[in-house]
Image (cartoon, helix red, strand yellow):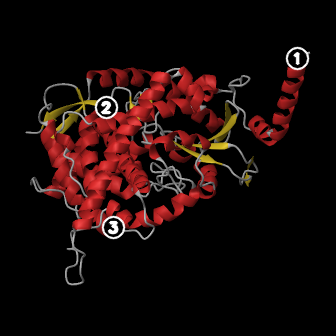
């Protein structure tokens, strides 16, 4: 009798759930993919395997979406994901669906309500306070820091230049960490001179764990995750606590330092080259932020400024190593600007890097640091195509797929060709969005590009970047398959920030 009752309850619960989700189910059928959706898990089984396997799955979904007008659906457990790979379709929801997807809760455990992950009511006023930090005047003042820190990095690289293959990742991340902390927090950490940086290692631990949980609906419940992944859950907790303590110490030191400073009078204004740091703006804000709010916002900036720029710079270095003729053109441009001198980079130099700018953008197009954007649909939204995105579905804007969509980038969409940013205007403003798009785009995108130009130009004046044997072997095999030497075939991972499987290994040769 008990089993019969339980069976009846299960049938009733299933019927009620399907009735409640009938609009989602109908949308899922309209945009369905070839792969079978299994009971309970949906298409989540497709994400089993390594971080590289998950990225390959998302790449396949992107290609399949091209065949279906740029939009498809997959079920991740009982959540309906709408994957968009067309900029015209992405344009409207990125401007109107501003709330982050529900699974962002995993990242909020570490980041709290920092601007990137915050709910709209918190994000909107905080962004207004942050904006002055990224004025052009401040950005120009930051170039001196970028230049000085990039020279430190170049000096550190002399230890490995000419000595074979090595991973450049730590050198780039510590350069960015030092630059970000000095320009936005007003402190000099000198992490480039440290053999290891626990902060970045602990952050990568959290990102790796959270990214995996997004694709595993059976572990999205915190209690279930702790029971079946105790070691992983404990590692996440320890890493989070280290990061929080690190940031709290910085904030407290800065807070106490500001209290000791004398107020700036009208006759003693800040000099032309000085600026108010991001942290100072938050502390002096009339909103009255406490330690938690300050930690959330500074953590977003430190992590975002460090990791985004680092990934973009590292992939650009890989592209320069793979295509020496492109690297030579960049070097010739640098020589024209600096006239063989060893002077530091200045703000006036950066707009003159026309070809370097195109190379960076083409690298960001093929290998965007954040390959996906996730938003929540909170009320039905009708697209120009007639399809209605219904309340409750999750939007996955595939920047990776949009940047490779042949409809907007041509038949050579997967070919590395920097000249496309010099001779061809964008066919749609959302066709290129390495730093997101719409009201919630990355506020520090100009900061990132200026930092990347500075460090790459400083590096290339001193060294020639060479490919590794593994890189050459992979590319040679790829060329046999597609008969196009300009089509890079790098192994990448699914993460908050997309990474190179081989950890950005290169070789450096000193220029004579």
Q: Which residue is mark 2?
A: 504
Point out residue 179 in the picture as x, y percentages from the top left corner: 25, 51
Among the two numbered marks 2 and 3 on one chain, the one whose residue lies closer to the N terminus: 3
Query: 412 or 77: which is nearer to us?
Result: 77
Q: From the viewer's perspective, is the residue at label 1 or at label 3 nearer?
A: 1
* Secondary structure of residue under mark 1: helix
Point out residue 266 in the picture as x, y percentages from the top left corner: 24, 83
* Secondary structure of residue under mark 3: helix
Vertical position of residue 490 compared to residue 115: above or below:
above
Give the distance between the C-alpha atoms of the residues marked 2 and 1, in whole angstroms.
60 Å
* Secondary structure of residue under mark 2: loop
Query: Residue 1 lies in what quarter of the image?
Result: top right
For disc 3, the neighbor class at 10 Å (few under 14, some 14 to 19, many from 20) is few
Q: Is residue 358 left or right of residue 60?
A: left
Vertical position of residue 500 compared to residue 331: above or below:
above
Disc 2 to disc 1: CB gap under 8 Å: no
Q: From the viewer's perspective, is the residue at label 2 or at label 1 nearer?
A: 1
Point out residue 450 in the picture as x, y percentages from the top left corner: 30, 56
Vertical position of residue 441 compared to residue 174: above or below:
below
For disc 1, the neighbor class at 10 Å (few under 14, some 14 to 19, many from 20) is few
Among the two numbered marks 1 and 3 on one chain, the one whose residue lies closer to the N terminus: 1
Give the distance between the C-alpha atoms of the residues marked 1 and 3, in whole angstroms.
71 Å
Q: Is residue 44 left or right of residue 22?
A: left
Give the distance between the C-alpha atoms of the residues marked 2 and 3, in whole angstroms.
31 Å
Point out residue 313 in the picture as x, y percentages from the top left corner: 31, 43
Residue 487 visible (yes or no): no
Residue 8 visible (yes or no): yes
For disc 2, the neighbor class at 10 Å (few under 14, some 14 to 19, many from 20) is some
Among the two numbered marks 2 and 1 on one chain, the one whose residue lies closer to the N terminus: 1
Residue 2, labelled with which disc?
A: 1
Residue 136, labelled with which disc?
A: 3
Q: Residue at x 81, y 35 (%)?
A: 17
């Amino acid at each position: 009798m008990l089993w019969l009752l339980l069976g009846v309850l299960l049938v009733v619960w299933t019927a009620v759930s399907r009735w409640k989700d009938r609009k989602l189910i109908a949308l899922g059928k309209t945009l369905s993919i070839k792969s079978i959706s299994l009971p309970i898990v949906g298409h989540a089984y497709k994400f089993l395997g390594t971080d590289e396997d998950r990225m390959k799955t998302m790449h396949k979904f992107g290609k399949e979406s091209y065949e279906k007008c740029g939009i498809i659906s997959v079920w991740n457990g009982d959540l309906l994901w709408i994957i968009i790979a067309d900029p015209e379709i992405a344009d409207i929801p990125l401007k109107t669906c501003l709330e982050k997807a529900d699974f962002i809760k995993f990242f909020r455990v570490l980041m709290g309500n920092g601007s990137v992950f915050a709910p709209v009511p918190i994000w909107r006023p905080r962004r207004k306070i942050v904006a002055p930090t990224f004025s052009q005047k401040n950005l120009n003042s930051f170039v001196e820091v970028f230049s000085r820190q990039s020279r430190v990095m170049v000096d550190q690289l002399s230890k490995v230049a000419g000595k074979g293959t090595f991973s450049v990742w730590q050198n780039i991340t510590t350069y960015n960490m030092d630059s970000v902390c000095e320009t936005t927090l007003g402190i000099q950490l000198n992490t480039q001179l440290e053999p290891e940086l626990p902060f970045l290692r602990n952050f990568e631990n959290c990102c790796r764990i959270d990214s995996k949980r997004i694709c595993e609906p059976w572990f999205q419940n915190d209690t279930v995750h702790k029971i079946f992944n105790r070691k992983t859950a404990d590692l996440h907790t320890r890493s989070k606590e280290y990061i929080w303590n690190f940031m709290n110490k910085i904030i407290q030191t800065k807070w106490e330092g500001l209290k000791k400073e004398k107020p700036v009078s009208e006759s003693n204004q800040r000099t032309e080259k000085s600026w108010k740091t991001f942290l100072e703006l938050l502390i002096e804000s009339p909103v009255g932020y406490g330690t938690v709010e300050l930690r959330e916002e500074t953590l977003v900036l430190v992590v975002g400024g460090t990791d985004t720029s680092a990934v973009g710079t590292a992939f650009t270095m890989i592209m320069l190593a793979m295509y020496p003729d492109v690297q030579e053109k960049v070097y010739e441009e640098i020589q024209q600007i600096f006239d063989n001198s060893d002077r530091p980079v200045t703000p006036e130099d950066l707009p003159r890097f026309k070809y370097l700018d195109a190379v960076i953008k083409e690298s960001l197009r093929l290998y965007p640091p954040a390959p996906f954007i996730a938003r929540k649909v909170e009320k039905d939204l009708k697209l120009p195509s007639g399809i209605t995105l219904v309340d409750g579905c999750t939007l996955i804007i595939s920047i990776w797929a949009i940047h490779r969509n042949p409809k907007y980038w041509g038949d050579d969409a997967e070919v590395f060709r920097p000249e496309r940013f010099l001779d061809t205007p964008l066919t749609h403003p959302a066709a290129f969005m390495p730093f997101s798009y719409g009201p919630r785009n990355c506020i520090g995108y100009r900061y990132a590009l200026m930092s990347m130009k500075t460090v790459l130009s400083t590096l290339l004046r001193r060294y020639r970047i060479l490919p590794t044997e593994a890189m050459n072997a992979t590319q040679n095999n790829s060329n046999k398959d597609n008969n196009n030497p300009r089509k890079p075939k790098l192994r990448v991972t699914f993460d908050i920030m997309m990474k190179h499987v081989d950890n950005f290994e290169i070789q450096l040769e000193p220029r004579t």
